[in-house]
Image (cartoon, helix red, strand yellow):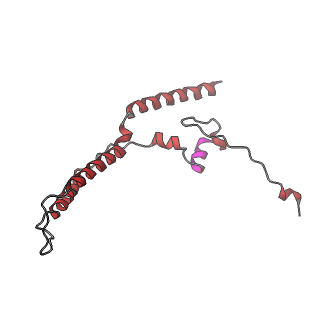
Amino acid sequence: MNNDSNEKETLEPMEEAEWGKIENNQMGYGSEEERYAKRGLEDWEMVEKMETSEHRIPYWFFALFGVLLLVAVGLTFPFWGVRPGYERSWFDWGIPIGVTWCVVMACIIYYMVDYRHRDSDAKADLARKEAELDSLLRNDKKNL
């Protein structure tokens, strides 16, 4: 057996990429295009290049939700789905609890959908300024 095959090549540790920092060595690849082709974008690059959705929740979704809510409330009334000989009251706590649940869930969904729009202008300005500074720094290094 050959001793050379048992020896393992030691690899240098990979430097962790900092958020928003563009590496000059393309993380060990020959060029930036090669890095994109083989490795893809870093997390922060994907977030920066991702388009924010400007679409609101469609009106038909609210209409569908309203119709379903009306049917659910209607089915709680004592004249639908009643067994013979069983008396139900007109009011029970299921309706207010259901409405509370719908309002809380709507607030949570609104927060999850709309959280990216907050401070987006400030973040866009900051990202644009950082990109300008990075391009200036890269041009200065090339001129040296």
Q: Magenta stretch containing residue 34, yes or no?
A: yes
At horizontal 74% and vertical 47% (from top left) the residue drawn is 11
Secondary structure that dominates the magenta span: helix
At horizontal 36% and vertical 38% (from top left) the residue drawn is 117
Q: Can see residue 30?
A: no
At horizontal 50% and vertical 31% (from top left) the residue drawn is 131
Task: Work out whether residue 66 or residue 1 is closer to the camera in this orientation and state it.
Answer: 66
Q: Magenta stretch containing residue 86, yes or no?
A: no
Given the current orientation, which residue lies at the most extreme left position? 79
Q: Can see residue 98?
A: yes
At horizontal 47% and vertical 39% (from top left) the residue drawn is 48
Indicate whether 56 appears above or below 143: below
Given the current orientation, which residue lies at the most extreme bottom position? 84
Where's the N terminus, which quadrant?
bottom right
Task: Work out whether residue 99 or residue 26 is closer to the camera in this orientation and state it.
Answer: 99
Where's the C terminus, which quadrant?
top right
Q: How many labels does the image show?
A: 0
Relative to residue 17, is residue 80 drawn left or right?
left
Task: Work out whether residue 131 or residue 57 is closer to the camera in this orientation and state it.
Answer: 57
Report x, y in % for residue 57.
28, 48
Indicate whether 131 appears above or below 49: above
Indicate whether 61 appears above or below 111: below
Report x, y in % for residue 66.
19, 55
Report x, y in % for residue 91.
14, 58
Relative to residue 129, is residue 92 drawn left or right?
left
Q: In which quarter of the image is residue 54?
A: top left
Report x, y in % for residue 29.
65, 44
Relative to residue 123, is residue 92 drawn left or right?
left
The magenta stretch is: 29-37
